[in-house]
Image: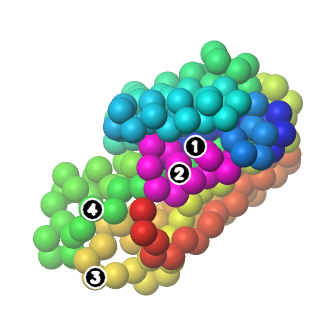
Amino acid sequence: MAGKIAIVTGASQGLGEAVAREFAERGAAGLIVTGRNRERGEAVAQSLRSGGCDARFHSVDLADLTGVRTIVSAADKAFGRVDILVNAAGDTDRGTIFDTSPELYERIMAVNLTAPFFLIQDAATLMRREKLAGSIVNIQSMSAHGGQPFLSAYSVSKAALAALTKNAAYGLLKHRIRVNGLNIGWMAT
């Protein structure tokens, strides 16, 4: 991690915050941490800066594709590159196959699948431009392998994210960009 520049989505709390803190502790030169809650996100970035990492909070709602497309450009503007992208943000709102509204379904898919897709696209483009051997990590879920009845749309989104991860891994391999997924189980965030 020493000297690396990373983007971590969902870093204003939970797993994303833990990943950002670990990167900073391991010597990351710069971090773009994203989240919806400006107060928490700025506090995380300030805490990381006080430890010596150049961390910057980028407030964005990942359900808004226009906002998503600003994340990698913020890293490019601040640091001139990105070595690592971690798609840790996730929407876990509840809904069964019977009561999930179209609006909830679309939001969950936007945050859990569409945002990672276009973040991978933007980060890989920047990595190629800078001729970097980059790394992209998608936080997946065991729910993709069957799911819980109360997380219908979430389970579908994470299964699709697993397919995206495999597709991106094969597609970016020749560009020296590694793409992996971590199947995280239930955790207290």
Mark earlier in primary sequence (1, 4):
1
Q: Which residues are magenta?
A: 11-23
Residue of label 2 = 16
Distance from the alpha carbon under mark 2 to that under mark 3: 25 Å
Q: Which residue is mark 1?
A: 8
Q: Which residue is mark 4?
A: 93
Cβ–Cβ under 8 Å for marks 2 and 1: yes
> Would you name the residue on which mark 3 appears?
149
Density class for disc 2 (Cα within 10 Å; few <14, some 14-19, many ≥20) is many
What secondary structure is the magenta-colored segment mainly?
helix
Give the mark nearer the N terminus: 3 vs 4: 4
The amino acid pointed to by label 4 is Asp
**Amino acid type of the residue tagged 2 in the rendering:** Gly
Q: Nearer the viewer, mark 3 or mark 4?
A: 4
Name the element at disc 2. Answer: helix
Residue 77, percent across and down?
Answer: 63, 16
Name the residue type under label 3: Pro
Quadrant where the C terminus is found in the figure: bottom left
Q: Secondary structure at mark 1?
A: strand
Residue type indicated by callout 1:
Val
Q: How dense is the environment of label 4, judged by Cα within 10 Å: few (below 14), some, or many (20 and up)?
A: some
